[in-house]
Image (cartoon, rainbow, N blue to C red):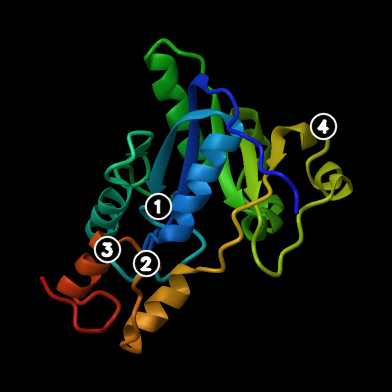
C-alpha cells in the first residue's frame, strides 16, 4: 500500500472548475473536488452547473433552479467551495470552452492572471477530442483527470496523439475511486430506494421534499 502524500502548497488565485449537470450532485462530486484541491494546491473550487447540457438533448431531469439549490446545499460549510452561475445565466448550450473563457475574463477583470484547472473523470476525458474547441479549452486551463470505474487512466501516447503539443496540460490524479453516479441515484429514487450516504443530507431532504426524480414533481 502506497503512502499518502500531504497536500500540495496552495497556489494563490488558483481555481478548480467542476462542471456538470449535477442532476443531482452527490458525495462523489464533492470528494473529487476536495482531492483535486489538495493534490494540486487549488485555492478555490467553483461548481458550475450546466444550463443547457449539449450532450443531453432532452436536458436535465431536475430544473435549473433545483440543481442550483442542491449544489448550494451540498457545498455549504466548505469555505473553499463556491457556486458559479456562469453557465446558467447565459443563453445557449453550455460549451466548456466558452465557460472557461468567461471565467478567465472574470479573473482578468479582477486584475489577476487566470489560473484555471478543469476537473473531469477519465470517462469524460475519453470524449474530450470530440468536444467543441478542445485546443482552445486547453489554452485556457489545465485539466485534472480523476479515475473512473471501467475507464483506464490515459497514457502519454494517447494524450500526445489527441492533443499534440498540449499533453503537458494534463494532471492525472490517483483518486478518489468512488463508483457513484447521478444516473444511479435518480434510478434509486425512482425505485424508492434509499440514497442516504450517497448525497449530503440536505440534498436528500430537498429531493424528498420536492419529489424530484419520482414523476411526482411538486412546486
Badge 3 marks a residue whose secondary structure is: helix
Q: Does label 3 or label 2 sit earlier along the sequence?
A: 2
- Residue 78 falls in image quadrant: top left
Dot 1: what SS?
A: loop
Residue 213 placement: quadrant: bottom left
Observer able to see residue 210: no
| Label 4 close to label 1 by CB (< 8 Å) | no
Q: State whether residue 213 is above or below residue 115.
A: below
Q: Nearer the viewer, residue 200 or 49?
A: 200
Residue highlighted by disc 1? 50
Q: Which mark is residue 60?
A: 2
> Could you tell me how many numbered marks the image carries?
4
The residue indicated by pointer 4 is 165
Decide which of tag 4 and tag 2 comes sooner along the chain: 2
Which residue is at the front of the view, 207 or 179? 179
Residue at 56% in and 68% down: 179
Amino acid at each position: 500500500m502506497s503512502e499518502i502524500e500531504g497536500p500540495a502548497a496552495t497556489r494563490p488565485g488558483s481555481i478548480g472548475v467542476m462542471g456538470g449537470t449535477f442532476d443531482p450532485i452527490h458525495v462523489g462530486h464533492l470528494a473529487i473536488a476536495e482531492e483535486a484541491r489538495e493534490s494540486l494546491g487549488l485555492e478555490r473550487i467553483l461548481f458550475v452547473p450546466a444550463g443547457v447540457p449539449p450532450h443531453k438533448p432532452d436536458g436535465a431531469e431536475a430544473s435549473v433552479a433545483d440543481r442550483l439549490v442542491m449544489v448550494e446545499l451540498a457545498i455549504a460549510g466548505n469555505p473553499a467551495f463556491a457556486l458559479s452561475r456562469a453557465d446558467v445565466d447565459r443563453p445557449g448550450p453550455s460549451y466548456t470552452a466558452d465557460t472557461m473563457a468567461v471565467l478567465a475574463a472574470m479573473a482578468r477583470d479582477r486584475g489577476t492572471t487566470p489560473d484555471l484547472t478543469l476537473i473531469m473523470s477519465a470517462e469524460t476525458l475519453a470524449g474530450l477530442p470530440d468536444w467543441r474547441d478542445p485546443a482552445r479549452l486547453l489554452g485556457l486551463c489545465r485539466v485534472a483527470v480523476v479515475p473512473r470505474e471501467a475507464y483506464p487512466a490515459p497514457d502519454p501516447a494517447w494524450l500526445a496523439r489527441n492533443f499534440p503539443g498540449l499533453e503537458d496540460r494534463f494532471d492525472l490524479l490517483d483518486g478518489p475511486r468512488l463508483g457513484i453516479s447521478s444516473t444511479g441515484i435518480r434510478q434509486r429514487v425512482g425505485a424508492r430506494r434509499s440514497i442516504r450516504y450517497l448525497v449530503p443530507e440536505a440534498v436528500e431532504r430537498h429531493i424528498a421534499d420536492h419529489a424530484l426524480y419520482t414523476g411526482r414533481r411538486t412546486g
